[in-house]
Image (cartoon, rainbow, N blue to C red):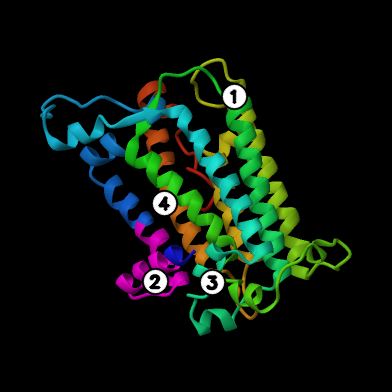
């Protein structure tokens, strides 16, 4: 584990940050990069558009150019399943590390500065949020198998690698602002008992998390039930183009609220994570709306919001 500690130290020293700030910076940089690439159409069409919305390079593009060459680095769209496998593996790995105070956990937690450690999540918060993230990963993995359809669609290698990095990073983000409590009080199975009265925050926002998860599941099930690509006519899709994306953002927002350290409104690391989720899915929702307009006409989606009615 000395090599892990050395690697973490080297990376943080090079960045001039502690582990919490470095993780936040990763999410913010990933979000900024996604937005920047989405603005010029010659980058967006090559690297961000995937699945049925993807188009081949248009007239006048140099097919031998570097960008077109990089755009040919693609993987099957079914690789999305690997995101949720990575999420579950990450959740399982860090659960073992937290219970056993493993070397990987200590290599990161001990490199969180005193300010962040003093404003720590409680152990119960860490456990609740870890369980909810594991539920989210498990559900999405099941859906990716149960709702899968034969497809030749592809996505860019960079998109795939960024997705894997994101889900692995979220596995750390869910507990890192609780590192002070984890280091001070070893977690045991006794901490998982359900006789502890929930806090007001848990009592309110855990049910909302489950409702948002249910809405997202219903959206995915409805899209799977469609016989062919068409404008969805389900009531929830009449208000927004991609309500399942909106539900995803709400899920991460609720995790950020539930994981807020004492005296804070939200967990800033998970808020940065939400920023990336919103940027990534927001761009995809925009391209989806444009695709609907091109395929079915502008009148097909005249006044629908993109992800969340009356917000975006």
Q: Position of residue 250 (x, y in %)?
A: 59, 53
Q: Point out the tag, 3 or 2, that comes first from the N-terminus.
A: 2
Query: What residue occupies the far right of the structure in this picture?
Result: 195
Crowding at mark 2 (Cα within 10 Å: few <14, some 14-19, many 20+): some
Q: Point out the tag, 3 or 1, that comes first from the N-terminus.
A: 3
Q: Is residue 122 above or below residue 210?
A: below
Looking at the picture, tell me which residue is in the foreground, 208 or 175. Answer: 175
Q: Point out the tag, 4 or 3, that comes first from the N-terminus.
A: 3
CB contact under 8 Å: marks 4 and 3: no
Residue beneath disc 3: 109
Q: Point out the tag, 1 or 2, that comes first from the N-terminus.
A: 2
CB contact under 8 Å: marks 1 and 2: no
The residues tagged by marks 3 and 2 sit, at their Cα atoms, a distance apart of: 12 Å
Residue beneath disc 4: 279
The residues tagged by marks 4 and 3 sit, at their Cα atoms, a distance apart of: 28 Å
Looking at the picture, tell me which residue is in the foreground, 9 or 259. Answer: 9
Q: Which residues are magenta?
A: 5-29
Of badges 3 and 1, nearer the viewer stands 3
Residue 126 is drawn in which quadrant?
Answer: bottom right
């Amino acid at each position: 584990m000395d090599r892990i500690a050395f690697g973490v130290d080297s990376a943080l020293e090079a960045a001039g940050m502690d582990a919490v700030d470095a993780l936040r910076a990763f999410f913010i940089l990933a979000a900024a990069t996604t937005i920047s690439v989405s603005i010029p159409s010659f980058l967006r069409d090559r690297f961000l558009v995937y699945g049925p919305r993807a188009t081949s390079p248009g007239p006048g593009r140099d097919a031998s150019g570097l960008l077109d060459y990089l755009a040919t680095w693609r993987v099957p769209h079914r690789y999305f399943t690997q995101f949720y496998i990575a999420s579950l593996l990450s959740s399982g790995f860090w659960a073992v590390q937290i219970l056993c105070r493993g070397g990987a956990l200590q290599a990161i937690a001990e490199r969180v500065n005193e300010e962040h450690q003093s404003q720590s999540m409680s152990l119960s918060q860490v456990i609740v949020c870890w369980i909810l993230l594991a539920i989210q990963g498990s559900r999405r993995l099941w859906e990716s198998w149960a709702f899968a359809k034969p497809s030749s669609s592809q996505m860019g290698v960079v998109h795939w690698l960024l997705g894997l990095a994101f889900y692995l990073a979220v596995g750390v983000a869910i507990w890192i602002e609780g590192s002070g409590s984890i280091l001070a009080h070893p977690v045991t199975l006794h901490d998982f008992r359900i006789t502890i009265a929930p806090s007001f925050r848990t009592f309110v926002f855990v049910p909302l998390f489950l409702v948002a998860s249910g809405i997202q599941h219903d959206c995915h099930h409805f899209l799977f039930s469609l016989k062919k690509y068409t404008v969805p006519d389900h009531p929830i899709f009449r208000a927004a183009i991609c309500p399942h994306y909106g539900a995803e953002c709400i899920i991460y927002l609720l995790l950020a609220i539930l994981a807020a350290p004492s005296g804070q409104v939200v967990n800033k690391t998970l808020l940065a994570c939400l920023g990336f989720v919103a940027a990534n899915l927001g761009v995809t929702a925009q391209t989806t709306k444009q695709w609907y307009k091109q395929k079915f006409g502008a009148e097909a989606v005249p006044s629908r919001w993109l992800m969340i009615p009356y917000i975006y």
